[in-house]
Amino acid sequence: MRRISYLFPVVLVGAATLLPRPGASQEFKPSKQIETVVHTGPGGGSDLFARAIAEMLQKEKLIAQRMQVVNKSGGGPAVAMAYLAEKKSDTHTVGFYTGVWVTNPLTTVEATVTLKDLTPISRLVLEPAVIAVKADSPYKTVKDFVEAAKKNPKQLNQSGGTILSRDNLMRLLLQKATGAQWNFISFPSGGERLSNLLGGHVQMMVIEPQEAGEQIRAGNLRVIATLTEKRLASLPNVPTIKEQGIDVPLIPQARGLLLPPAAPKEVVAYWEGVFDAFVKTPSWKQYVEQNQFEDAYLKGAALNKFIDALKDQMREVLKEAGAKVIR
């Protein structure tokens, strides 16, 4: 009996060491290539953003598997959102969203998938925009362009993305504020939008610094206004739209990561952990600075609150721009 009384605790301890740690079985790491969905074509803002992040995550050794960017353009973000919705519970698919993923369902009957039907993981940045023309354009300011548009209604052209993208909404707001009229020509990819401006087929473009940076530095584009509250550090001599006497709402552009619907908790936890670490890395900080982003990391309850507030804000902007809101 004495021998048993000594051995029994030893057996218990030995068995305890074999039991899984709490939550250990819930740990997740990707075991194959990660499909990374964006709604723009090659060269578009989301495409560039996703590819840059995929490269930095590998460089910082925060993920072991490759992220393969897949372009699902069409209907604004509708095709990409529907594709992700079909990937319910998939553990090796992610997507990168922008503000148009919020606005599109507000105005489009066919867009039945909303941002919160998916699984938002993080908001990474808020992105400014600028108004750019070709370097040899006669327009030195937004007022120059507006006056030309007033003298020649519907003769000037602006290139852009979808009709619900920030670039077209800014056009509608500017037209309402100034009384000028010009055309909006939609192109499926950022490369096409930019090449048509550089080729002289359109006269103006609302564009993000990330997308335009190389052409600005090369002297091929002239920025005539920033769509920001204060001047950008990289463009200190370029006045804001409000400094030029045009007072219109500024449309926020958020970029972030999401997963398909019903993403397992351990997959959500994995990606939150990856980006908790990522936004502290030198690579990320340098990238944010170079592209004039506002580092605006959010997750969890704070992210959901932001998405709800953005939806309310964009509903009002759409109404102000004259768009029909159905939700």
Image: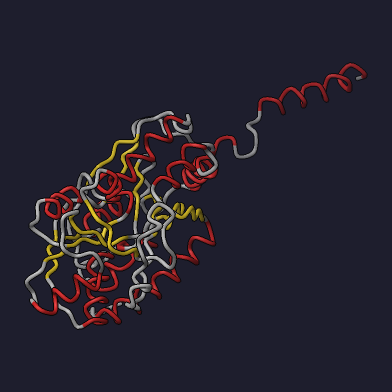
Picture residue at 42% right of the left edge, 42% below the top = 287
Residue in front for this viewpoint, 244 or 267: 244
Residue 290 in which image quadrant:
top left
Q: Determine whether 175 is above or below 226 in the image.
A: below
Q: Position of residue 256 (x, y in %)?
A: 40, 53
Decide if residue 320 is in sight here. Answer: yes
Picture residue at 45% right of the left edge, 71% below the top = 309
Q: Which quadrant is home to the C terminus?
A: bottom left
Residue 312 in which image quadrant:
bottom left
Residue in front for this viewpoint, 302 or 133: 133
Q: Which quadrant is home to the N terminus?
A: top right
Residue in front for this viewpoint, 216 or 14: 216
Picture residue at 37% right of the left edge, 57% below the top = 118
Q: Is residue 118 left or right of residue 171?
A: right
Tell me how many marks there are. Answer: 0
Q: Position of residue 277 (x, y in %)?
A: 54, 40
Residue 9 in which image quadrant:
top right
Decide if residue 114 is in sight here. Answer: no
Q: Is residue 314 left or right of residue 219?
A: right
Q: Is residue 49 left or right of residue 185?
A: right
Q: Determine whether 176 is above or below 214 in the image.
A: below
Q: Position of residue 258 (x, y in %)?
A: 39, 51
Residue in front for this viewpoint, 198 or 293: 198
Q: Position of residue 128 (x, y in %)?
A: 37, 59
Q: Determine whether 146 is above or below 21 in the image.
A: below
> Residue pushed farthest right?
2
Q: How is the image coloured?
A: secondary structure
